[in-house]
Amino acid sequence: MRQARKMLSANFAEEHADKIPTLLSVSEQAQKFLAEVGGAGKKMRVVIEVDDQGVLSSTLEADPELLELSQAMKLQFRGELIADGYNIRKVDFSKIHGVAGNDLGKLADAMEIPDGARVLDLMCGYGAVSAHILNRAANEGHSIELSMCDLHKVQLDRIPDEVREAAADVTVGDARNLPYEDASFDAVVIKMGLHEVPHIDQPLVFQQVFRVLKPGGRFVIWEVMPDTGEQQDAFTEQMQKKNELAGYESIVVDRYFTRGEQMPWLYEEAGFAGVKQVFEANFHQSTLGRLDSELGGDHHKLDDLNAFVRRCTPDAIRTEVDYKDEGDSISMKVPNRIFRAIKPE
């Protein structure tokens, strides 16, 4: 039932880029409610007020018929105002993920981009994947149309000028509600982005990508994918603690790292066929590597993170993940995998 809901976005237009990004989840029952009301000019507005004593209150304003119908249908309005971690996070991913330039070649190989293709780099961040795709196309003498899309304008603002100029468009948009027409792309890629979407919402991303892909189009994902539930729990807890110390509030709440065995199900439930793992590597990630880029150089925070990692990493999995504790740096290997699937003709 949760997957039948829609994600509505607001304030993503360029002229509103300085406003608070708003993501509204509309349940199946709520969609029926809105459809039943119909007509023009029907609005609901949530107002948050702060009095002179700093006390918060909120009010829901709506036309009387909307309020009566919502009460009859037993609806409730839920909202969350939360700090966006990606507005302050700026890191060198090559240092914290251990990814080299030739690793991106594996990603491009999996996409099998033909001459004249339209490609979407979804959750593109600073554009490292896009830069590689564009360079490869140029070296092969191919002409491609590349779109870059990310939820966070701050991230898009960090795209190098040469990459931005070579892209067909750079768009602020939500992977759960893509701002593109049906059957628009020959290939879609997400590198290290799916885990930023809450667990309950990840199927929505697959549904949206399926919608915007042309028949025969490829959907390629590169992700951190722990092998077992114990590894998944330990790694997730460590990342939550690191993000808490770094002040990335929304990232603490949202992140979910899918296990390798869960990935084929996500593809197949959305309608994809030919799901295949095409690449696997075990990258070593260390707590010390987070010190400058995410913990602000604060050694007290690093000490807190290391103490937490020691407590939350079960002895039973330490050999499996090649756990190494060198005092100020704790490292372990984390499986990274590339999966590919096709939208049936």
Image (cartoon, grey):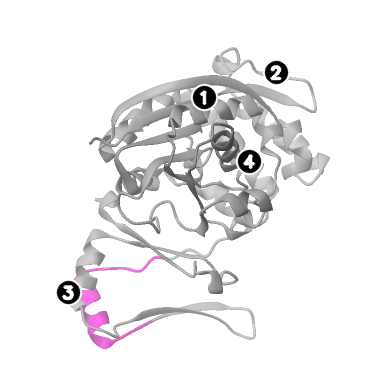
Q: Which of 129 and 4 is in front in this view?
A: 129
Report the residue marked by disc 4. Answer: 241
How far across and down, in percent of the image, does residue 195 sit? Answer: 49, 40
Local secondary structure at mark 4? helix
Report the residue marked by disc 1. Answer: 231
Earlier sequence position, callout 1 versus callout 3: 3
Which amino acid lies under the numbered mark 1 shown in the image of this protein? Gln
User: In percent of the image, x 25 and y 38: which residue is there?
Assistant: 271
- Numbered disc in front, either 3 or 2: 3
Q: Judge whether 146 appears above or below 70 on screen.
A: above
Which amino acid lies under the numbered mark 4 shown in the image of this protein? Lys
Report the residue marked by disc 2. Answer: 324
Question: Distance from label 1 to label 3 (Cα)?
Answer: 47 Å
How far across and down, in percent of the image, does residue 156 sit? Answer: 60, 55
Earlier sequence position, callout 3 versus callout 2: 3
Report the residue marked by disc 3. Answer: 36
On residue 141, which mark appears? none
Earlier sequence position, callout 4 versus callout 1: 1
Crowding around mark 3 (Cα neighbors within 10 Å: few <14, some 14 to 19, many 20+) is few
Local secondary structure at mark 3? helix
Crowding around mark 1 (Cα neighbors within 10 Å: few <14, some 14 to 19, many 20+) is many
**Picture quarter containing residue 206?**
top left
